[in-house]
Image (cartoon, rainbow, N blue to C red):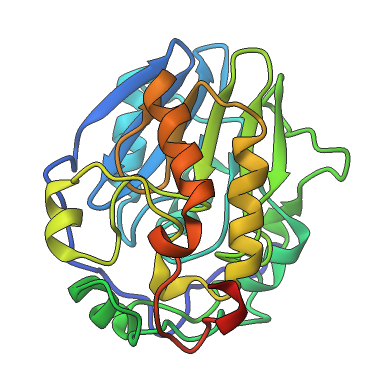
Amino acid sequence: MDQEMNYGEDYKVIPATSVESGKGVEILPDVYCHTIQIVNIVLVGNRDGFVLVDAGMPQSANKIISVTEERFGEGSRPNAIILTHGHFDHVGAIIELIEHWNVPVYAHHLEIPYLTGKSSYPEPDATVEGGMVAKMSPFFPNEPIDIGDHVQELPKDGTIPYMDGFSWVHTPGHTPGHVSLFRDEDGALIVGDAFVTVKQENLFDVMMQQKEISGPPRYLTTDWKAAKQSVKKLAQLHPTVAVTGHGVPLLGEELTENLAVLVRDFEKIAVPNRGKYVDPDVH
């Protein structure tokens, strides 16, 4: 008998939203990005088989199911759910989705403790400069969820179940087990939060989805040296399209140029000037 799954005691709805909420865009014939409040979910595949990447905001399961059925047909369900990491805005509906679809979940092995009730993420850092969202971050859910044996480790060989052609890339910094997903054939990159395309700390920018390449959300990033190396690693893949966890997708030359700038000026663009997780040696 499956153990009972549960969210942390601090699990709650976060009322933040954006002008892009409820909108979706087909990036490639088999890659669809949909914004739920302030975070993106991604559907990869077609009617013959697809996966869901990340699981949205708290209490967004019905919306995710609806988006999935609108794209693939009534009663459709993914072969699996792939998690880039386990922060609340990427696993907010995971339990309801598992119960509804009865599908496996995959994540990096270093992320498993945060998905099985064993470890809490470090506390958000509200002292970083950037805006109101950063100041609100201590109120975000931070306790670990527990989905028990429903989550499995991603294969160590870099392949991703049910995502032929894609491989996972370990991109720590934002979290220890953060991964991004890359398809060498066409340069498609599903970033997660290794970098984003909106200043996630600034409430106005988040609400209006002002496009600006940035590092991972400052208030939840705990290892800036690793975060910088992760951005470098992704840039070296030469992606042609990038779907980020927050903000609008970037394509072609705009992506190439912006990613090069982020790598070059990472300390200035991404790393906060102050904060309890900021190592002075990073600057």
Residue visible at 69% across and 55% down?
151
Task: Where is residue 273? Give x, y as percent.
Answer: 39, 78
Vertical placement of 42 versus 123: above or below? above
Rendering quarter of residue 234:
top right
Vertical placement of 217 versus 154: above or below? below
Q: Nearer the viewer, residue 255 or 282?
A: 282
- The answer to whether residue 4 of the structure is visible from this angle is no
Task: Where is residue 149? Give x, y as percent.
Answer: 73, 60
Task: Where is residue 145? Give x, y as percent.
Answer: 54, 72
Q: Is residue 164 left or right of residue 74?
A: right
Residue visible at 36% across and 45% down?
213
Total of numbered circles in the picture? 0
Task: Where is residue 220? Give x, y as percent.
Answer: 45, 73
Vertical placement of 211 versus 114: above or below? above
Q: Nearer the viewer, residue 98 or 42?
A: 42
Residue furthest out toward the right: 157
Residue visible at 18% across and 63% down?
16
Q: Is residue 1 left or right of residue 92?
A: right
Q: Is residue 82 left or right of residue 118?
A: left
- The answer to whether residue 137 of the structure is visible from this angle is yes
Q: Nearer the viewer, residue 248 or 71?
A: 248
Rendering quarter of residue 249:
top left
Q: Is residue 244 left or right of residue 158?
A: left
Image quadrant holding the N terminus, namely bottom right
